[in-house]
Amino acid sequence: MTNANETLWSPVGRPIEEILAPRPRRQDLSGFEPVYSDIVDYILRCTHRIWEEKNVGLCRTHYGADCVVHTLAGETRGVDQVIANTLATLAEFPDRTLLGEDVIWSEDAPGRYHTSHRIISPMTHQGDGAFGTATHRRAFVLTIADCVCVENRIVEEWMARDNLWLARQLGLDPWAIAQAQAAADQDGDQERHAWRRADLQRVWEGHGLTAPPPRDSASARIARAFDLAINQAMLGEAAMVFSSAVEGRWPSGRRIFGRPGWIGAVNQLLAMLDRPAWVLDHWAETPLPGGDTAVALRWSIAGLHARRGVYGPATGRHLLVLGISHFTVRNAEVIEDTTVFDDLAILRQIAGGLGQ
Amino acid sequence: MISDQQLLSLAANGAGIDALVLQTCRTEILGQEAYGREATRSLLRRAQINWTSDPVVARAASFAVMIGETSAGIGAMAVDLDGDWISRIWGLSAAFALATVPRVDVPGDLDLHQTAQRIRLSASSLPDLQEQDRAPLTKALATLLDDPPQSWSAWRRTRLTVIRAASTPVGAVALARLTGETGDTEAGTGCWVAVLTCASGTLATDIPPCAGPRLPAGLIPAFQDRPAET
């Protein structure tokens, strides 16, 4: 799952004019449209065509008919739901621009590609929708979308979006949104939330969705740091994989500087939980143009909300966190950390939403 | 290669952005964070760093700093260079407010050790900083903490985390996160500073005055309107 020679495919350091310029195929991509030169181009270009050129119907040729999209707020199934959600977002934020910061990828089996796409989206809240009445405020939101791509189609996706930060930029009250979502969750068939119960159990049993990375890889060292920190409470030892001057972006505007910052951010999650458990669900690493290495880890945390902390007083709720992290590694040290999880969906769980 | 004049024009009013700045550029000015060319242009036009004399341009392969006297003290613009493009911009002036959007605070132990150094500089992370410049730069940074510029003097327990540093023809430059305590409580906060040290001395950017007993950055309650205590 490591790609050694494809440095130039990374969008890092490349202007959009160059990224979107047509080019001949440079990777054997069986079953993909000829317009895509490689798997990174597939992700960047189809995102541009669907979202910015507003050809949302292309989802029919770019998503599997039964595609499952996993977020911490729930799962959707089928391409029709993908189209409906895309249209709804564009109705609310029609000028949404998707600035692709990086695509970290792996070929997990022949012809089966996994891409981890980090996107910053500046946009204006112009229409009524999931975030209420239009506020006409500008905002930006950080998203990481992990996709499994086979023959021109995304067949499964995991998405983490910093929704609470978006709500705050729009001047909205995140707790009020979470309470309203939780109240709606408590109506109707509770079996629609069964995925969360199953995922909590999976994480507590220690079942990650991936095989572990090779021992000497950057991915393995960083994954071990999470394991040490969350499963073993060895925060100081865990932080040694980070540069003493690491800089990080975490959700809801959290900023990390140095190992103390990373420890503080992790412990903010850890300290409020009983039975904390962390598992690795995917990893990939690709070289960056300057000689650094980009690492993508998708992970899950399960725990019992047992103590007062960043999310308020203990509620006794079981909490699930779906997180995706991108790291820049230089000389075996992490120098940048971009981690995304959905704080709003965590508040929603705390408020009694997403099932028991 | 981006010229010094292009950098200065960019700093002055955002001129030439489309040919200089990547579409993914992350820009921090005026206490705000923006992404993309359009938002960066807007921020740069509002920011108006008013140099009162020509700033020094200190540049290396992947990092450059323009630093000099402005109408609000020592100001600077720092940029990450990615070949022919700028991928990140920091605008530093005492005239700019600190962060304006409430962020979730990350509580942390600044030191992790009783004998910790107040300067965090990882040489292996800073390939543009030559070995002979490390010690003088670190010493200059320590001196700034011991004998701070007037605008830094209200801060206590200060630490510097150096995220960029480079050796340049005009001296060693660094961009660092200054963290410390300020106001009536032991509440922590932080802001960016740029420092140039050379044979003729050290130049460090001035920082905005404290907005009140508690600064907004990092100090807003983690989540407003939490569930009531039970």
Image: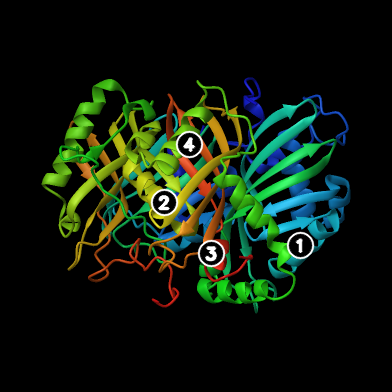
- Residue farthest to the left? B147
Q: Which residue is mark 4?
A: B81
Could you tell whether B27 is left or right of A76 in the image?
left
Q: Label 1 amino acid?
A: Asn
Secondary structure category for the residue under label 4:
strand
Could you tell whether A156 is left or right of A30 in the image?
left
Q: Which residue is mark 3?
A: A164
Do marks 3 and 4 both belong to one polypeptide chain? Answer: no
- Mark 4 vs 1: CB contact within 8 A: no
Of residues A124 and A170, the one nearer the viewer is: A170
* Cα–Cα gap, marks 4 and 1: 37 Å
Residue B53 drawn at (x, y percent): 29, 50
**Which of the two discs, 2 and 1, sits closer to the camera?**
2
Q: Which residue is mark 1?
A: A85
Mark 3 Cα-neighbour bin, 10 Å: few <14, some 14–19, many ≥20: many
Of residues A255 and A24, the one nearer the viewer is: A255
Secondary structure category for the residue under label 1:
helix
**Which of the two discs, 3 and 2, sits closer to the camera?**
2
Secondary structure category for the residue under label 2:
helix
In the rendered structure, the residue with mark 3 lies on which chain? A
Mark 2 Cα-neighbour bin, 10 Å: few <14, some 14–19, many ≥20: many
Q: Is residue B12 visible?
A: no
Q: Label 3 amino acid?
A: Leu
Indicate which disc, 3 or 2, sits on the residue closer to the N terminus: 3
Indicate which disc, 3 or 1, sits on the residue closer to the N terminus: 1
- Residue in the picture at 38% in, 36% down: A238
Do marks 4 and 1 both belong to one polypeptide chain? Answer: no
